[in-house]
Image (cartoon, grey):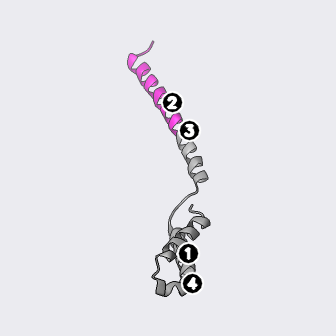
Amino acid sequence: MTTIQSIDQLAERLARLVPPGLREAREDLVANIRATLQAGLGKLDLVTREEFEVQRSVLLATREKLEALEAQVQELERRAAAGPG
């Protein structure tokens, strides 16, 4: 998921866009932006890169097993179609 550092950097960038007359409220604005970003990202259904990679390897292993089973089924069907041998 997005790191706190990334959220802080984004909050700082957004705060820099504030017009000069409102700069004195910058710290409050940064805190509010940070809280809003964290709340919004917290609602998203995100996973870490590590979790993603684990699931990716599980999927790959499952796909390989499925392909092997499909090959076995095809071989058994071929033998059954050929009749008693």
Point out the tag, 3 or 1, that comes first from the N-terminus: 1
Q: Nearer the viewer, mark 3 or mark 1?
A: 1
x and y percentages locating residue 74 in the rendered image = 43, 26
- Spatial CA span between label 1 and label 4: 10 Å
Q: Which residues are magenta?
A: 62-85
Residue where numbered disc 3 is placed: 61
Q: Residues within 10 Å of mark 1 (few under 14, many from 20)?
A: many
Label annotation for residue 68: 2
* Viewer-nearest of discs 4 and 3: 4
Q: Secondary structure at mark 1?
A: helix
Query: Tag 4: Cα neighbours inside 10 Å, few (<14), some, or many (≥20)?
Result: few
Q: Label 4 amino acid?
A: Asp
* SS at circle 3: helix
Residue occupied by mark 1: 34
Q: Residue at x 47, y 27 (%)?
A: 71
Query: Which of the two residues, 68 or 8, is positioned nearer the viewer here?
Result: 8
Question: Are the residues flagged by discs 1 and 4 in contact, CB closer than 8 Å?
Answer: no
**How far apart, in angstroms, are the residues tagged by discs 2 and 1?**
50 Å
Q: Is residue 57 magenta?
A: no
Is tag 1's residue or tag 4's residue first in the polypeptide sequence? 4
Q: Amino acid at mark 1?
A: Arg
Q: Secondary structure at mark 4?
A: helix
Instruction: Residue under label 4, please give it.
Output: 28
Q: In percent of the image, x 45 and y 82: which residue is there?
A: 19
